[in-house]
Image (cartoon, helix red, strand yellow):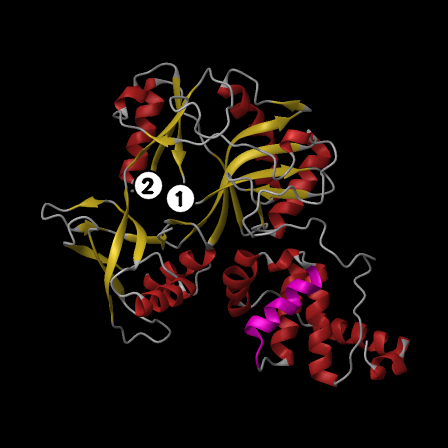
Amino acid sequence: MSGRAAAGGISVIMKITEFAESHRKGFKKVKADIQERWNTRVVPQGLHTQGRTGAAEYLSRYGKGISAKKVVELALTAEALGASEMAAGFWEKAFELETGETARFDTGSGDTTPSIAVSTVRSAARPAVVLAGIPDSLQPGRIATMQATDTVLPRTSYILNPECIGQAKRDGHHDVTIATEEAVAHQSRSTNCMSPFSIEFDNAAKSVASKLGAFVLDGERYYKSASGSEHRSAAQAATENVNLGQGSVKPVVCYAIFKALYADGKDLRDTEDDLVRVKAAKPIGAALIAALKDSAVEVELLPTAVTTAEKQALADKQESEGREGEVWIRRFARYSEGKAHRTDIVRTKYVIELTVRVTKLTPTTVAGRLFAAIEVADIKTGKAIGSVGTGFDADDSRRLAALFAEKPDATFIEIAAQKFSENVILLHARYRDLAK
């Protein structure tokens, strides 16, 4: 704390408290432009989970020349969304900009650190925080998930097989949610700990765990655009909304529940009936849906198709809506690690996924965009196979433009498309990522 703040002592602390209260009085709802910053900058980077550090990091990245008024709006937004320690950091900065004085903002919690330290850095290390009541092998960073492989068989093989059950495939990131009444953590399929995608979701999960007991859900996080298309990040969904002419519409934060791996005090991975895991997730999912009914977060319990008619209906629906595809699980199989048992869980797709070479970034006159589309060619033949005009956000565009400027003949990207036309041109191609 600076000398000026120290000299003022308690009076300065009272000033910052009164400063915040004066702004809270006129606050009605989060402004659209601030909500967009939250969805596209704060949540994807997990800054809202890092307390004051998250606020400082946000301001260092995006706060050059920022006004006190904007920082106040960020503080009010963080409070409204449950990130009180991040809000404290914003209040302190807004107060400094407004008055020239520095003071620590008291949240009343007595704790200035996030409840769980999570990292987006790729690491298989076990996190420092252990969730009480969760078995050791189901702690965040320790869960070996069951992963689907692409099948070579037609989907009819699974539709007609009475031993197979099916679920819709979502286009997002695998997210295993581990929840107790004290804390919530998220893990990817590669055992990396993930930043929370929504403070509201985590608060709801803790509330549900306090009533139903600790749980572990196998699921997927994704974001929906105004048209209902699924995206892996809020920024990509927001960009799609801009392309649709609906830039003011905010992406919908979604979490799809596949099944429960732990519920009612039981590790369900050894259960040799996947429907037991699916059914165990239902009361948890229903409670989460009820807790979040007035929020901006959408939770879905993925329907599980068991009969031949249900499986055919699932496939028809996925295809008619232009979705990713289906996941087929051998019902009477133990939940196994990785892709060891390739026949236990497979996926069929309605999209083509491939790596292509970038040949050109087409110019654009649209403000804020570096290029209009990405022209691509087949890696093996070198033949032009069309262009990709969606799926990339501003950060993706900057990375791709920089890489293409450096390596114009060796820039490769991963894309998804519905199919090829008769003259071998991609139809409805979408950017996924830079090629690994």
Type of the residue with mark 1? Asp
The residue pinned by badge 2 equals 323
Q: Quarter of the image containing the N terminus? A: bottom right
Q: Is residue 396 left or right of residue 17?
A: left
For label 2, the crowd category at 10 Å Cα-Cα, with few meaning under 14, some 14 to 19 and many 20 or more, is many
Q: What whole-number distance in Å separates the C-alpha atoms at marks 2 and 1? A: 8 Å
Most common SS among magenta residues: helix
Type of the residue with mark 2? Arg
Residue drawn at (74%, 42%), measured in percent from left and top?
182
Q: Is residue 102 visible?
A: yes
Closer to the eye: label 2 or 1: 1
Q: Residue 391 sits in which quadrant?
A: bottom left
Q: Nearer the viewer, residue 82 or 394?
A: 394
Q: Earlier in the sequence, mark 2 or mark 1?
A: 1
Relative to 13, does residue 118 appear above or below in the rendering? above
The magenta-colored residue range is 51-64
Relative to 100, does residue 414 appear above or below in the rendering? above
Q: Nearer the viewer, residue 79 or 140?
A: 140
The residue pinned by badge 1 equals 171
Percent coordinates x, y for residue 103 in the rendering? 80, 75
Q: Is residue 2 left or right of residue 229?
A: right
Q: Is residue 223 left or right of residue 356?
A: right
Q: Are marks 2 and 1 in contact (CB under 8 Å)?
A: yes
Percent coordinates x, y for residue 320 in the rendering? 27, 38
Helix, strand or loop status at disc 2? loop
362 inside magenta stretch: no
Percent coordinates x, y for residue 337 in the rendering? 50, 27
Q: Is residue 429 left or right of residue 297?
A: left
Residue drawn at (30%, 25%), measured in percent from left and top?
312
Percent coordinates x, y for residue 358 in the rendering? 25, 60
Q: Residue 64 sits in which quadrant?
A: bottom right
Residue lying furthest left: 423
